[in-house]
Image (spheres, rainbow, N blue to C red):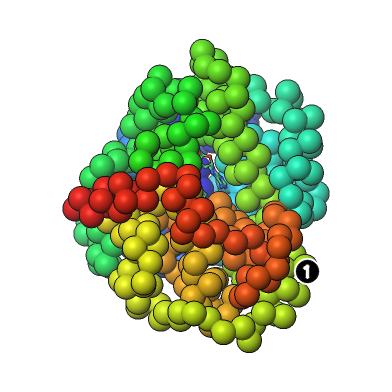
Amino acid sequence: MSRDQRVRDNWALLHAQDLALRHRAPLAVVFCLAPKFLGATARQYAFMLRGLEEVERGLAAKGIPFFLLTGEPSTVLPAFLNKNNAGLLVADFDPLKVKRAWKNSVARAIRIPFHEVDAHNIVPCWIASPKREYGAYTLRSQLQRLLSSYLTDLPRIRKHPHRWPGRTIKTDWSTVHRRRMLDITAGEMNWIIPGERAALRTLKRFIAAKLDPYKEDRNDPNRGGQSNLSPYLHFGQLSAQRVALEVLRAEVRETSREAFLEELIVRRELSDNFCFYAPDYDGPKGFPAWAQKTLAQHLEDKREHVYTLKEFEEARTHDDLWNAAQLEMVKRGKMHGYLRMYWAKKILEWSRSPTEAMKTAIYLNDKYELDGRDPNGYAGIAWSIGGVHDRPWGERKVFGMVRYMSYNGCKSKFDVKAYITYVKGLK
Ligand code: FAD
Ligand code: FO1
């Protein structure tokens, strides 16, 4: 277990149990807690570990032990498998480079069958497309063709009849927490409760109150029209397939349902496609050729403003809207979706180069966003700064033909002053 940290609706766990039952074998779940993970701070570790505590309880009720191993997965996992004479390993799919490296080093170190299951996407990433897609329109048609076979109900995990032969110990979570809460530069969040049960409650509440107005409300940061599901989806505490099934059952306008499913299915799977097939998803080499060319042509353009990472991080630019978006992310751990585009595009405008802008945006996004370190983040930042999954627009300074966003454009979309006041009120 790594990316999909849940007992319910988890295809990797279902597949592992199916094989264990067929071989009348015991089954265990292992999570490798790496020494560090892409700049994650106490904020993200607290959310993740509380979710894993619930996973351990949920598995125990099914007679399945949970082992939390601390250390480099490529070392601790093979050692665990050898010590326990494991007959097979099932891992959940993750397109991030660090995870591919873990997977490859584990595969080299073990001599048992190793299955990888995409428990995160509805249509498995490599089935949705065998190659990098340059826009949502090409992936969307593939997904629509395949959804009928993959968007099915999910079986439940059974109580496992074959006992684990070795010693099972309950994880000492307070020690694990204490050891992880070192980097408190981004503190824990209390507006959102971690874990599978809270995720399902949040989903139900969203469907009941916000799904119907989603199409109109989702781009206005003053209307709170988003679902707040991204932290749960990022840590795999909630299955996107479960979300889609519940949204399909809801009594709402088709336009709202479609708008939401476009984001949840097409945009999300497109991000995994990008990170899986574009090795440079976190740098300008991952941009489409037209964007690399146009940004290079404007590299020497004079920047009206240039800010350092520290000035960005401390929200000390000349732009009160950008500063508010940065502060919302720092204080709340979740910037509104519409502002994320504006926020990243202004980092391009006020940095010396697209390379520096990518570094700044990824660093800040992954340090402060609860849902950071996610393919959606790398794709969202690359869309904003490097035209990934977008088309060329009218040429202008610094941006070249990469889509531009302006303060006045935001003012025409929502009440900027109200948003700035709301962020000022955040603790
Ligand atoms: P809702 O609007 O309720 O959407 C529901 C779900 O649909 C989201 O949880 C997400 O899984 C998916 N979704 C929505 N919008 C997008 C999108 N544009 N691309 C891919 N999937 C989407 N998302 C992250 O999960 N982690 C990030 O670190 C992240 N960083 C971003 C950075 C930038 C610069 C941009 C432009 C977008 C980023 N996004 C990121 C995508 C999107 O903004 C968030 O997924 C969304 O705001 C999460 O809030 P929500 O779950 O309430 O969204
Ligand atoms: N996955 C792991 O298997 N082990 C970890 O120690 C780990 C830490 C971690 C911290 C913050 C965070 O946002 C994600 C983290 N993940 C970890 C990965 C996560 O579960 C997802 O797999 C990816 O981030 C999304 O693809």
Q: Position of residue 153 (x, y in %)?
A: 60, 20
Please report the residue visible at 47 percent of the width from the left and 37 percent of the height from the top: 218
- In the rendered structure, the answer to whether residue 333 lies left or right of residue 126 reads left
- Residue plotted at (44% across, 50% down): 411
Task: Tell which of 392 and 384 is nearer to you.
Answer: 392
Identify which residue, 340 or 204, lies in the foreground. 340
Residue displayed at 33% across by 68% down = 315
Whole-percent x, y for residue 391 in the image? 73, 56
Count how many numbered circles sit on residues in the image. 1
The quarter holding residue 169 reads top left
Residue 162 shows in this picture: no
User: Residue at left 75%, top 30%?
Assistant: 144
Quadrant position of residue 18 = top right
For mark 1, does the 10 Å Cα neighbourhood hold few (<14), some (14 to 19), or many (20 or more) residues?
A: few
To which residue does mark 1 refer?
289
Question: Residue 95 is drawn in which quadrant?
Answer: bottom right
Is residue 13 visible in this depiction of the protein? yes
Residue 170 against residue 251 in the figure, above or below: below
Front-most of residues 155 and 109: 155
Q: Amino acid at mark 1?
A: Ala
Disc 1, SS = helix
Instruction: In the rendered view, tell whether residue 199 sits above or below residue 219.
Output: above
Residue 121, percent from left and from top: 62, 39
Near-viewer residue (172 or 135): 135
Task: Using the image, determine if residue 265 lies above or below residue 397.
Answer: above
Q: What percent of the width, then of the height, locates residue 408? A: 48, 56
